Amino acid sequence: MARPLVEPRLVVASHNPGKVAEIADLLAGHAIAVVAAGDLDLAEPDETETSFAANALLKARAAAEAANLPALADDSGLVVPALDGAPGIRSARWAGPERDFGRAMAELERRLQAACPDGVLAPAHFTCVLALAWPDGHGETFTGTVHGRLTFPPRGDRGFGYDPVFIPDGHGITFGEMDPARKHAISHRALAFAELTAACLPAHGDRARA
C-alpha cells in the first residue's frame, strides 16, 4: 500500500519553470503548499540512472533529504521508436545546459530525416514518472504515457520542451498549440498524477472538497 502524503508542504524537485508550473497546477486544490527546488537553492543531482523511474527517485530523494520535506520529482521524456527510443531519458540533455529546446527539436528532426524518409511523421510517445519521496528515504513512483506522432516545423508557443512537435493521438494540434487546461487533462504528466492522487492524496482531496 502506498504511503499517504499528509504533510502540508511539498518541494517540487525541478529547476525547470515550465515543469514546476505544470506540477503546481496539478496540485491545485489539494491543500498543499508547493515550493520549487530552485527557490530553496537546492542543487540539481546528476541524473546517473538508466530509467525514468530511477532518475525520478534519485531527484526526489535528494530534494527531500536536503529540504527535510517530502519532495516530488518528475523524470519524463520523448521516446521515438524510429530512433531506438531516443531521446528518452536524455530528452532534456539534448537541449544543453541552456535548455534550448529549439536546438533539441532541430536535432530531433535531423536524426529522423537521416533515419527514415517519413521521419517527420514518426510515431512517438511521452513518458512521465513522478516520484514522491520523504526525508526518511521512502519513495513511491507513478507512470503515465501518452502516444502520438511528431510534426515539423514546430507549432505553437504554449507548453515547454518538445510540446511544439508532438500531436497526441485523437487530436489535430500539438501540445504547443493546446490550451494548458486541455493539455493537463490528457498529458503523460496528468496520467501519472492521477495515479499518484489515487494512491497518496485522498486525504488532501477530501479536505479540498469539504
Image (cartoon, rainbow, N blue to C red):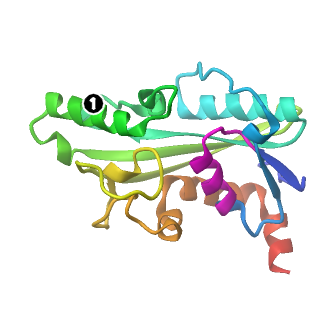
Specify whether 155 is left or right of 40.
left
Residue 193 lies, with reference to residue 106, above or below; the image says below
Specify whether 154 is left or right of 178.
left
Q: Residue at x 74, y 26 (%)?
A: 43
The stretch of residues the image draws in magenta is 12-25
> Hey, which quadrant is residue 174 in on the image?
bottom left
Percent x, y of residue 163: 40, 51
Q: Residue at x 59, y 34 (%)?
A: 53
Label 1 environment density (alpha carbons within 10 Å; few <14, some 14–19, many ≥20): some
In the rendered image, residue 207 lying in the magenta stretch gets the answer: no
Find disc 1 in the rendering and name its residue. 83
> Hey, which quadrant is residue 67 in on the image?
top right
Q: Residue at x 78, y 65 (%)?
A: 30
Percent x, y of residue 32: 83, 59
Nearer to the camera, 11 or 127:
11
Q: What main secondary structure does the magenta stretch of the protein show?
A: helix
Percent x, y of residue 136: 89, 32
Residue furthest left as drawn: 117
Q: Amino acid at mark 1?
A: Leu
Specify whether 72 is left or right of 118.
right
Q: Callout 1: helix, strand or loop?
A: helix
Residue 74 lies, with reference to residue 103, above or below; the image says below
Nearer to the camera, 97 or 124:
97
